[in-house]
Amino acid sequence: MFNLLPFVLLSFGAGAALAQDSDTVTASSIDWNGFNKTVGGHLRVATPFAKPCFSSGASNAAQCSQIASNNENHLFRTDFPGAYSITQWETCQTTGDGCLLDWHNTTNQKAFTAPEQCGQGSVPNYYVEVHGASDVTATLSFVKKNNVPFVIKNTGHDYLGRSSAPGSLALWTTYNAKYQPQNCASVKPQSAITIGAGVQFQTAYEFAKENGVVFLGGADPSVGASGGWVMGGGHSGLSPSYGLGVDRVLEFKIITPDGQLRVANKCNNADLFWALRGGGGGTFGIVLESTFVASPNVPVQVVLGMYGNTKANSTKLIKQLAKSAVQMGKDGWGGYITPSLASAVWLNPVLNEAQAKASAAGVVSAFAAVNGTTQFFVMPTYTDFFNTFIAPNTDAVGRPQALVTRLIPDKSFTDQTLIDSVTDGLVNSDFGQILVVAPYAYKDFDPSATSINPEFRNAVWHALVSYFWNYDATPASITQTYQKLEAQWATVRQRTPNAAVYYNEADVYEPDWQTRFWGNNYARLLQIKNKYDPTHLLDCWRCVGWKGQSNSKYKCYAKVPGTSTSRRDEL
Ligand SMILES: Cc1cc2nc3c(=O)[nH]c(=O)nc-3n(C[C@H](O)[C@H](O)[C@H](O)COP(=O)(O)OP(=O)(O)OC[C@H]3O[C@@H](n4cnc5c(N)ncnc54)[C@H](O)[C@@H]3O)c2cc1C
Ligand SMILES: *[C@@H]1O[C@H](CO)[C@@H](O)[C@H](O)[C@H]1NC(C)=O
Ligand SMILES: *[C@@H]1O[C@H](CO)[C@@H](O)[C@H](O)[C@H]1NC(C)=O
Ligand SMILES: *[C@@H]1O[C@H](CO)[C@@H](O)[C@H](O)[C@H]1NC(C)=O
Ligand SMILES: *[C@@H]1O[C@H](CO)[C@@H](O)[C@H](O)[C@H]1NC(C)=O
């Protein structure tokens, strides 16, 4: 009944540079044709997204113009095996090798004419279309036999480059137009939706609406539901009331590194199930599908605030919003405060209209204080809310971007120094946002059922500060951008020493990352990693059991002085 059509992105870097790496085998020593046969002829070549624009022989004006006009189009980008949403992960940050357009002006020919060249960067060289579990199994045994480094790619949204690597093997899962969620009896409160790896939120939301149910997913039409999002936590504007993705997932189907297809749920492979509920993507195996709670449809209350986005107004507004943040969190509001859009929006699936107006009084007065406006709406479904307020305003993709974040605990909202530092970072960076997505009002969970940092549940705001750069940035300036973020966040980190950091949206160089991502759960996660992947066939940047930056797979990560590459990273 369920048609699986994910893709395995098998990448192997050809060329002299990669041949020097001890853990990368040269192309000539590998029987690619033989391997291609074992995966039913589904081996393909992967190329960088913007390659058709570059004049080095293969340019194609029609394709280039389509690519240039869709550089920041979320769903368009994710259809390309060689494309990444956060584009430094298509490049090599230490050498400058890459194939990017000028995102300020994608028709700027300077970016793609000599001396600029289209380099493979960190884009995998090959991929395999997987038409069934056996293709994954064949790929895993190929990887083991040939010792090819391996990454798994779904939609390519990762902020920490965990789905790309030079000279590595990657698994790409992609949208499947024929997927048939199982067991979705739309009227039953405990109905569920099964979602294949590669299915994106836009599809899941439309499906939920058609079936009269709520599917909890993130604020982007193109992120995948069954990949990194859910395994790293999975937040949504519905999370304050309904929990995180990890709270709603009932079952995974996964191929572990030993090649076995396993069902992981509360009763089978329960240790693996726990690990997959927060321990991160790309670490324990290749997930083929996951099944989520689908709750009965409810209307959502919405409050939209708009104001004149000046630094002074944003500063005043954010500090004012902090005063009612904990109460809003208790009442179940989720949402996004986005100075660059001069707006903020909250939604609430548990209050009625009158209750919503009373509960959001603090928000109304905060906007009034900066001469802004607020409006209330009732949307018939979360899908309508998403289509109206979120999809047209999603966060930028198609540009290099580095970020720092922190899950701000409820107790810290009385710490004015902290709130001032968060606000300062938000208004003085290229892009800042407060995501009101921590599961603060959601109490119907078993604390031992998920492996996220338990401090996630005491948080109210997920604060995010970031910078962009462009195709022509030098390795030195990229390093400086990461350093600027470290400096900017120092006070925030120091004032919230026990706070959680969201694994999927973290600083690439997050200090003390094991504890920030998982708290006391790290030791058990590492045991489970060692049980299911004893040779650490799967390895990714700051994933459970990470081998450390010295591994050649990570040679394209900027070298940032002062960030930890200590023993503790090399567990
Ligand atoms: C514009 C944008 C908006 C975002 N919005 C949200 C949001 O609203 N809520 C939220 O919680 N997060 C959000 N994120 C963060 C998002 O959760 C992470 O980027 C996440 O890693 C994406 O997972 P992916 O599988 O789609 O991406 P990928 O980059 O393809 O993969 C991410 C990680 O998961 C692994 N992985 C992927 N597929 C599988 C699989 N089938 N089996 C095993 N491992 C796999 C990869 O190896 C990699 O480690 C957003 C990111 C961006 C760029
Ligand atoms: C794999 O085999 C198929 C079918 O023969 C072929 O079309 C494809 O080009 C091959 N892939 C590579 C990378 O050679
Ligand atoms: C973008 O680049 C093109 C080609 O170089 C140029 O003609 C155009 O003026 C630029 N547009 C802007 C807005 O800078
Ligand atoms: C705040 O924004 C309003 C418009 O909403 C504008 O009139 C006002 O000048 C701004 N105030 C400051 C301090 O920038
Ligand atoms: C709001 O507008 C009033 C006049 O309409 C003005 O006196 C006041 O300074 C403005 N406040 C802000 C914060 O801009």
Image: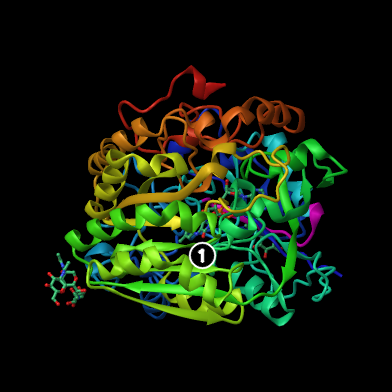
Front residue of 324 and 102:
324
Instruction: List x then y, in percent, for residue 346.
Output: 46, 67
**What segment is highlighted magenta in the picture?**
124-134
Position of the N terminus, as image quadrant, is bottom right
- Which quadrant holds residue 316? bottom left
Reply above or below: 452 against 216: above
Furthest toward the top, the residue is 567
Front residue of 421 and 518:
421
Q: Can residue 453 be seen by looking at this rendering?
A: no
Q: Secondary structure at mark 1?
A: loop
Q: Does 392 sit left or right of 268 as displayed?
A: left
Instruction: List x then y, in percent, for residue 306.
Output: 31, 73
Dot 1 amino acid type: Ala
- Which quadrant holds residue 344? bottom left
Residue at left offset 81%, top offset 53%: 134
Instruction: List x then y, in percent, for residue 258.
Output: 79, 37
Q: How many marks?
A: 1
Q: Does 312 sit left or right of 180 as displayed?
A: left
Position of the C terminus, as image quadrant, is top right
Mark 1 Cβ and ligand 1 under 8 Å apart: yes
Provide the residue designation for mark 1: 219
- Which quadrant holds residue 107? bottom left
